[in-house]
Image (cartoon, rainbow, N blue to C red):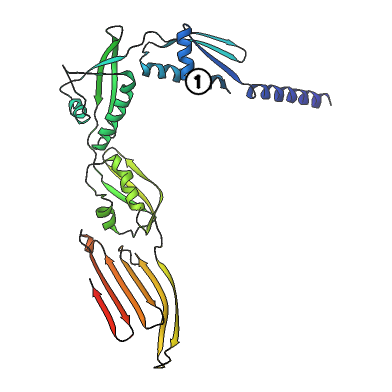
Amino acid sequence: MRSIFLTLFVLIIYTTNTQGVYGQEITLSIQGENQVATHRIDSIGYNPKHSSFQSADSVITQTKKSFRALGYFSARETSREQKGDSLNIELALGNYYKNIQLHISPNSSLPTYLKQLAIPIRNDSIVVTPAFAKALLEKLTQQAADSGKPFTSFQLKNLTPISNTTVSGNLVITEDATRYLNAIIIEGYPKMPQAFIKRYAGLKKNRIFNSSQVQQQQDALDALPFVSIKKDTEIQFTRDSTNLYLYLNKQSANRFDGFLGFASDPETNELQLDGYLDLALVNNLNYGESLFLNYKSDGDDQQQLRIKTELPYLFGSPLGASAELYLFRKDTTFSETTQQ
């Protein structure tokens, strides 16, 4: 009996302590080295409430990165005080630098990239603001990816103050080999007309891989009436190949609407077909072909018939064929026929 009581007592204590640990809320306070710095930190904003000290530390790290990106390159934590559930941090922002002078190696491909972005190079250097530096790196990275080099990286290195307003450093490129699209794998709709992949969407093997065009090409396929996108396109990169996976579903684009009936002509006693018919048959043979038929008869000896067919990308070529027939008849005195 005593053993059971001790076990129960320990269990109650353990449960109570566990609830205390996981139920705590950490309050974070970040102060600057002076009132001006504190005001700047508050203007950036940060989350003061956290469920753990690890979460609070991630906010402190992100705050330092944010100020360095704004031009406070020497921003650093100078003191830390923890009292119970409170964490007080002092962050010294240091000097604000409004310009970055970056050296550009003329022997690298950087001058070509910068020229395409219309950024002038003077004396093998460019001058940018800290706020623009991050955007510049992103633009250069995207530009390289669109040129078939998605793993090319750009970095700012060796940043050193040269005045109270300017730091100097190097813009460095680590370039990857040009990648080509080696394979296009279609999942979900294996009988998808290949001409629409190649001709309509512009996805062709052995061409330079362009990451920006992939989304546009997926959107083009999604606009087809007989195809839907099951999930976003995926790219598989291996050491020596680049494979694109398309996840497509075939969907019906057929349409049928109409009402037809038979009536007897009181003068001739012949049967007449009255009503209307609207029929569309699209991609039933998995060639992207279409057949449209529209028929109208108002019962007063007036009839219209329109038939149109389209065969795009004949035999996988960029050429297509279409034909249209239009018939109009009003009693026995007038009729019209048009062919295209």
Q: Position of residue 121 (x, y in %)?
A: 18, 21
Q: Is residue 215 above or below residue 36?
A: below
Tell me what residue is drawn at x 30 percent, y 49 percent: 184
Horizontal relation, residue 307 to residue 82: left or right: left
Q: Position of residue 155 (x, y in %)?
A: 29, 22
Q: Nearer the viewer, residue 13 or 24?
A: 24
Q: Position of residue 13 (x, y in %)?
A: 73, 22
Q: Quadrant of residue 265?
A: bottom left
Tell me what residue is drawn at x 35 percent, y 58 percent: 190
Tell me the SS state at disc 1.
loop
Please name the residue that numbered disc 1 is placed on.
Answer: 46
Name the kind of residue labelled 1 in the image.
Tyr
Q: Nearer the viewer, residue 81 or 112?
A: 112
Tell me what residue is drawn at x 34 percent, y 76 percent: 304
Q: Residue furthest front?
A: 333
Tell me what residue is drawn at x 29 percent, y 69 percent: 309
Horizontal relation, residue 312 to residue 13: left or right: left
Q: Is residue 121 above or below residue 241?
A: above
Q: Position of residue 118 (x, y in %)?
A: 21, 28
Could you tell me how many numbered marks the image carries? Answer: 1
Instruction: Indicate the quadrant containing the N terminus: top left, top right, bottom left or bottom right.
Output: top right
Instruction: Indicate the quadrant containing the C terminus: top left, top right, bottom left or bottom right.
Output: bottom left
Q: Nearer the viewer, residue 39 or 249?
A: 39
Q: Residue furthest right?
A: 1
Q: Nearer the viewer, residue 51 or 183?
A: 51
Specify few, some or many for label 1: CA neighbours under 10 Å numbering under 14, 14-19, or 20 or more: some
Q: Quadrant of residue 160?
A: top left
